[in-house]
Image (cartoon, grey):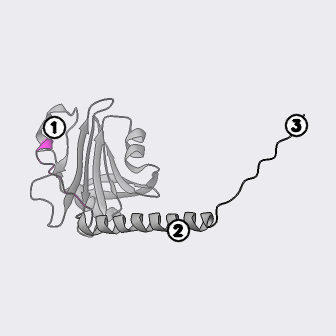
Amino acid sequence: MATETVTVRKRPGMAAKSVRDMVLSLAAVLAAGIVIYLFIPHSGGNGVHPVQYEDSVPSARRAAPYPLLAPAPGSLPSGWNATSVNYDGTNADTWTLGFIDPSTQYVALEQSNAPLNTVVQNATVDAVKQSATTLVNGVAWTHYQGSRYQALVLPGAKGTTVVFGTETFAKLGDFAARLSDH
Protein backbone atom coordinates (compact mmCIF):
# COMPACT_ATOMS: atom_id res chain seq x y z
CA MET A 1 0.00 0.00 0.00
CA ALA A 2 1.42 3.31 -0.98
CA THR A 3 1.40 6.29 1.31
CA GLU A 4 1.26 9.73 0.07
CA THR A 5 2.71 12.66 1.93
CA VAL A 6 1.02 16.02 1.68
CA THR A 7 2.98 19.07 2.61
CA VAL A 8 1.08 22.17 3.69
CA ARG A 9 2.91 25.38 3.35
CA LYS A 10 1.79 28.50 5.12
CA ARG A 11 2.01 31.62 3.19
CA PRO A 12 4.15 34.19 4.92
CA GLY A 13 2.20 36.90 6.78
CA MET A 14 -1.15 35.02 6.73
CA ALA A 15 -1.74 35.35 10.50
CA ALA A 16 -0.78 39.01 10.47
CA LYS A 17 -3.17 39.66 7.57
CA SER A 18 -6.09 37.95 9.42
CA VAL A 19 -5.53 40.03 12.56
CA ARG A 20 -5.26 43.19 10.48
CA ASP A 21 -8.54 42.35 8.69
CA MET A 22 -10.33 41.73 12.01
CA VAL A 23 -9.11 45.06 13.41
CA LEU A 24 -10.26 46.88 10.27
CA SER A 25 -13.67 45.17 10.43
CA LEU A 26 -14.07 46.09 14.08
CA ALA A 27 -13.15 49.72 13.32
CA ALA A 28 -15.76 49.83 10.54
CA VAL A 29 -18.49 48.46 12.85
CA LEU A 30 -17.58 50.93 15.60
CA ALA A 31 -17.60 53.83 13.13
CA ALA A 32 -21.06 52.79 11.90
CA GLY A 33 -22.30 52.60 15.51
CA ILE A 34 -21.01 56.08 16.28
CA VAL A 35 -22.64 57.52 13.14
CA ILE A 36 -25.97 55.87 14.03
CA TYR A 37 -25.81 57.15 17.61
CA LEU A 38 -25.06 60.70 16.50
CA PHE A 39 -27.62 60.97 13.72
CA ILE A 40 -30.57 58.90 14.94
CA PRO A 41 -32.79 61.06 17.21
CA HIS A 42 -33.22 59.94 20.80
CA SER A 43 -35.26 61.79 23.39
CA GLY A 44 -33.07 61.53 26.45
CA GLY A 45 -36.32 61.99 28.42
CA ASN A 46 -37.71 60.02 31.30
CA GLY A 47 -39.34 57.31 29.15
CA VAL A 48 -42.88 58.02 30.40
CA HIS A 49 -45.36 58.07 27.53
CA PRO A 50 -48.66 59.54 28.77
CA VAL A 51 -51.91 58.12 27.43
CA GLN A 52 -55.42 59.57 27.40
CA TYR A 53 -57.64 57.37 29.54
CA GLU A 54 -60.71 59.61 29.79
CA ASP A 55 -62.15 58.47 26.44
CA SER A 56 -61.95 54.80 27.48
CA VAL A 57 -63.89 55.23 30.72
CA PRO A 58 -67.47 55.56 29.31
CA SER A 59 -67.25 52.44 27.13
CA ALA A 60 -65.58 50.43 29.91
CA ARG A 61 -68.33 51.56 32.31
CA ARG A 62 -70.99 50.28 29.90
CA ALA A 63 -69.28 46.88 29.67
CA ALA A 64 -68.27 46.37 33.31
CA PRO A 65 -70.56 44.30 35.56
CA TYR A 66 -69.40 46.36 38.57
CA PRO A 67 -69.25 50.12 39.30
CA LEU A 68 -66.13 51.02 37.31
CA LEU A 69 -63.87 53.55 39.03
CA ALA A 70 -61.55 56.18 37.58
CA PRO A 71 -60.23 59.54 38.74
CA ALA A 72 -62.81 62.22 38.04
CA PRO A 73 -61.63 64.69 35.39
CA GLY A 74 -59.41 67.29 37.02
CA SER A 75 -59.27 65.45 40.37
CA LEU A 76 -55.58 64.53 40.14
CA PRO A 77 -53.01 67.21 40.94
CA SER A 78 -50.64 68.48 38.28
CA GLY A 79 -47.83 66.09 37.42
CA TRP A 80 -49.85 62.86 37.30
CA ASN A 81 -49.50 61.02 33.98
CA ALA A 82 -51.65 58.08 32.92
CA THR A 83 -49.36 55.46 31.38
CA SER A 84 -51.73 52.58 30.71
CA VAL A 85 -55.44 51.94 30.30
CA ASN A 86 -57.09 48.63 29.51
CA TYR A 87 -60.46 46.91 29.80
CA ASP A 88 -60.42 43.18 29.11
CA GLY A 89 -63.62 41.18 29.16
CA THR A 90 -62.12 37.93 27.89
CA ASN A 91 -62.11 35.65 30.96
CA ALA A 92 -63.02 37.99 33.79
CA ASP A 93 -63.98 41.61 33.31
CA THR A 94 -60.82 43.48 34.28
CA TRP A 95 -60.23 47.24 34.27
CA THR A 96 -56.66 48.48 34.72
CA LEU A 97 -55.48 52.08 34.86
CA GLY A 98 -51.84 52.98 35.62
CA PHE A 99 -50.17 56.30 36.49
CA ILE A 100 -46.80 57.80 37.28
CA ASP A 101 -47.18 60.41 40.01
CA PRO A 102 -45.15 63.63 40.41
CA SER A 103 -42.53 61.81 42.52
CA THR A 104 -42.13 59.25 39.67
CA GLN A 105 -43.77 56.47 41.68
CA TYR A 106 -46.16 54.00 40.04
CA VAL A 107 -49.80 54.01 41.17
CA ALA A 108 -52.48 51.86 39.55
CA LEU A 109 -56.05 50.73 39.82
CA GLU A 110 -57.27 47.25 38.97
CA GLN A 111 -60.87 46.11 39.20
CA SER A 112 -62.18 42.69 38.31
CA ASN A 113 -64.99 40.25 38.96
CA ALA A 114 -62.48 37.39 39.19
CA PRO A 115 -61.97 35.80 42.65
CA LEU A 116 -60.38 38.19 45.18
CA ASN A 117 -57.08 36.26 45.50
CA THR A 118 -56.72 36.13 41.71
CA VAL A 119 -57.26 39.89 41.37
CA VAL A 120 -54.79 40.70 44.16
CA GLN A 121 -52.12 38.35 42.80
CA ASN A 122 -52.55 39.62 39.22
CA ALA A 123 -52.12 43.21 40.39
CA THR A 124 -49.35 42.76 42.95
CA VAL A 125 -47.65 39.49 41.94
CA ASP A 126 -46.92 38.21 45.46
CA ALA A 127 -48.62 40.45 48.03
CA VAL A 128 -49.68 39.08 51.41
CA LYS A 129 -52.64 40.35 53.41
CA GLN A 130 -51.72 42.54 56.39
CA SER A 131 -53.77 43.31 59.50
CA ALA A 132 -53.69 47.08 58.86
CA THR A 133 -56.32 49.06 56.99
CA THR A 134 -56.60 52.56 55.54
CA LEU A 135 -59.85 54.52 55.70
CA VAL A 136 -60.81 55.95 52.32
CA ASN A 137 -63.93 58.12 52.43
CA GLY A 138 -65.00 56.28 55.60
CA VAL A 139 -64.48 52.79 54.13
CA ALA A 140 -61.71 50.44 55.37
CA TRP A 141 -59.40 49.14 52.63
CA THR A 142 -57.13 46.20 53.58
CA HIS A 143 -53.34 46.47 53.23
CA TYR A 144 -51.43 43.91 51.17
CA GLN A 145 -47.62 43.96 51.08
CA GLY A 146 -45.56 42.48 48.26
CA SER A 147 -41.89 42.55 47.34
CA ARG A 148 -42.53 44.87 44.40
CA TYR A 149 -45.87 46.56 45.11
CA GLN A 150 -48.07 47.28 48.06
CA ALA A 151 -51.82 47.51 47.73
CA LEU A 152 -55.08 48.65 49.22
CA VAL A 153 -57.85 46.14 48.52
CA LEU A 154 -61.61 46.62 48.70
CA PRO A 155 -63.78 43.57 47.99
CA GLY A 156 -67.25 44.32 46.67
CA ALA A 157 -70.42 42.40 45.88
CA LYS A 158 -69.76 42.52 42.11
CA GLY A 159 -65.97 42.79 42.01
CA THR A 160 -62.72 43.59 43.77
CA THR A 161 -60.91 46.92 43.61
CA VAL A 162 -57.13 47.07 44.10
CA VAL A 163 -55.14 50.30 44.28
CA PHE A 164 -51.47 49.33 44.15
CA GLY A 165 -48.03 50.61 43.34
CA THR A 166 -44.69 51.73 44.69
CA GLU A 167 -46.13 54.64 46.71
CA THR A 168 -46.83 54.59 50.45
CA PHE A 169 -50.13 53.27 51.77
CA ALA A 170 -51.12 56.86 52.66
CA LYS A 171 -50.55 58.06 49.09
CA LEU A 172 -52.37 55.02 47.68
CA GLY A 173 -55.26 55.99 49.97
CA ASP A 174 -55.16 59.58 48.65
CA PHE A 175 -55.38 58.22 45.10
CA ALA A 176 -58.24 55.86 46.03
CA ALA A 177 -60.15 58.83 47.52
CA ARG A 178 -60.08 60.52 44.09
CA LEU A 179 -61.77 57.59 42.33
CA SER A 180 -65.35 57.96 41.22
CA ASP A 181 -67.90 55.75 39.44
CA HIS A 182 -69.44 58.63 37.49
Q: Which residue lies at the image location 13% right of the left edge and 36% below the top edge?
A: 59
Q: Quadrant of the C terminus?
A: top left
N-term-proximal mark, 2 vs 3: 3
N-term-proximal mark, 1 vs 3: 3
Displayed quadrant of residue 148? bottom left
The CA span between labels 2 and 3 is: 42 Å
Q: Considering the numbered disc 2 on the image, is that residue within a helix, a strand or a loop?
A: helix
Q: Which residue lies at the image location 15% right of the left edge and 61% below the top edge?
A: 76
Q: Residue furthest top?
A: 91
The CA span between labels 1 and 2 is: 67 Å
N-term-proximal mark, 1 vs 2: 2
Q: Which residue is mark 2?
A: 20
The local crowd at label 3, few if under 14, some if 14 to 19, many if 20 or more residues have their Cα within 10 Å, is: few
Is residue 55 covered in magenta?
yes
What's the magenta region? 48-57
Left or right, 56 with reference to 145: left
The CA span between labels 1 and 3 is: 91 Å
Residue 44 visible in the picture:
no
Q: Which labelled disc corresponds to residue 61?
A: 1
> 34 or 124, which is in the foreground?
34
Please provide percent x and percent y for residue 97.
Answer: 24, 49
Left or right, 1 with reference to 7: right
Q: Which residue is mark 3?
A: 2
Chief SS of the magenta region: loop
Would you place residue 76 above or below residue 58 in this image?
below
Would you place residue 165 above or below residue 59 in this image?
below
Displayed quadrant of residue 33? bottom left
Q: Residue furthest right?
A: 1
